[in-house]
Amino acid sequence: MTVAVCGLLAGCVTHGPLIESGKAAVELVDTPFYPQSTYQCGPAALAIALEASGVAATPDALVPQVYLPGRRGSLQIEMQAAPRRYDRVSYELDPNLASITAELDAGRPVLVLHNYGLPVWPRWHYAVVIGYDPARQQVILRSGTTRREVQSAAHFMRAWDNAGRWAIVLLHPGELPMVADRARYLESTTGFERVATPASARQAFSAAIQAWPEDPIGWIGRGTANYRDHALSAAAADYQQAIKIDPNLPGARNNLAQTWLDLHCVSAARAELARIDESSLSAALRTAVADTRAQLAALPVRADAPQCAAL
Amino acid sequence: MKYNKLRTVLIAVLSVAILNTGGIQAARAAIVDTGAMMQTGRDADLAIIHAQLARDDVRAQLGQFGVASEAIDTRLDALSDSELAKLAKRMKDAPAGKGGVIVLAGAVFIVLLILELVGVIDIFKHA
């Protein structure tokens, strides 16, 4: 979010073409357009990106969600959070032009923040990149009140540099960006989980598991999605996998114990709870573990259900 | 390393998710969401306290910046703890994209015009 002062200088220096030459030009001509009203480029740009991603959303509907009247604008964090409510995972791209062109190649327009002023006197503006032309070194945008704005790559980069090179794409649950950073994708997905349906959260975490099977986060996230979706056996399997990767995850053990209880697998639940090291627990986890233990103690029937042997 | 720290935070959040939103048997399930799961001990306790403070802070600021009260909770719900923390600190000065037209006069206008012609800025072309 820091403004890059070097952007001003970078504009004067050229190191070969900004857009990799030899690539074919791309323009996502079917991308819809909503002209912005005063100060409201945020809702307009977001509506364009959402609709291009198959979500019916108008700028008017988005104003209450991302427009900040007192700032006469929209903040990046809220622009990134709002798509979650429309079943889309927003992902912040690597700060380079190649990551934008890769997303365009995949058919996804890219929402960017520009600064058309000076670093000390900023003029922030959201726009949607819909195409590029390597031969002409141009970038094509839906921007403000202009349906098809063509900027030179140098011009685009200067305004983008001065805005900290912020760019996001909207992914369907289960899609990965063309260049996926593990930390950023998992952070996006964890934010998405807050408001997502269990089915969508499961798809988003499944994509993480496929890309980074060695990371327990994807397994934990999918386990919880499965649990919420009443798929208890699948939840247990996911939590077990997370614990297998990292045995030192008391939260995953607690959730696994809870899942065993719901499956009426009492011995497994008891065994899992016994493996939790109480000394390292956070307050929230301690409460959860105490609750799980209390449920175990209060069970009227202590026998395992017949299906437990197979799980 | 940076990722390990993030990992801790994400596990903590995800671990407590079921607690927050209610699982199958909301009344009794003690499942923890993935984010809360990744933190342990004191760090996690502090993170939860900070998140709550940040949430209250952001709620107040959204109100001050003119967001209708009925929209505030919806906006808060979509934000993760780390996003709330960033917003709480930076809502006043974080970039706010707008794209409005600037009206200027006199010396300021001339300075801007020169910068524009030289190609340093690009204020006048875009609505």
Image (cartoon, rainbow, N blue to C red):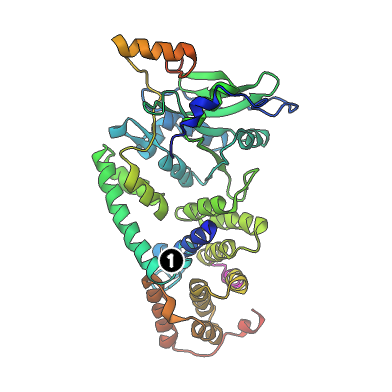
Mark 1 is surrounded, within 10 Å at the Cα level, by few (under 14), some (14 to 19) or many (20 or more) other residues, namely many
Marks counted in the figure total 1
Vertical arrangement, residue A130 with respect to residue B73, above or below: above
Q: In this view, does A256 lie to the left or right of A26?
A: left
Image quadrant in which you'd find residue A25: top right
Per the image, the residue denoted by label 1 is B16
Vertical arrangement, residue A69 with respect to residue A155, above or below: below
- Residue A169: x and y, percent? 55, 39
Look at the image and tell me whether residue B23 can be seen.
no
- Of residue A306 and residue B13, the one placed in the foreground of this image is B13
Q: Is residue A209 left or right of residue B92?
A: right
Residue at 50% in and 29% down: A7
- Residue A305: x and y, percent? 57, 85
Q: Is mark 1 on a helix, strand or loop?
A: loop
- Residue A171: x and y, percent? 58, 44
Viewport quadrant of the N terminus of chain A: top left
Residue bounds of the magenta highlight? A230-237
- Of residue A278 and residue A158, the one placed in the foreground of this image is A158
- Of residue A290 and residue B108, the one placed in the foreground of this image is B108
Residue A176 in the magenta stretch? The answer is no
Look at the image and tell me whether residue A98 can be seen.
yes
SS assignment for the magenta stretch, majority: helix
Residue at 62% in and 24% down: A14
Given the image, what chain letter belongs to the residue carrying mark 1? B
- Of residue B121 and residue A88, the one placed in the foreground of this image is B121
Residue A233 in the magenta stretch? The answer is yes
**As shown in the figure, which amino acid type bears the numbered disc 1?**
Val
- Residue that extends furthest to the right in the rendered view of this protein: A22
- Residue B62: x and y, percent? 29, 42
Residue at 27% in and 40% down: B68
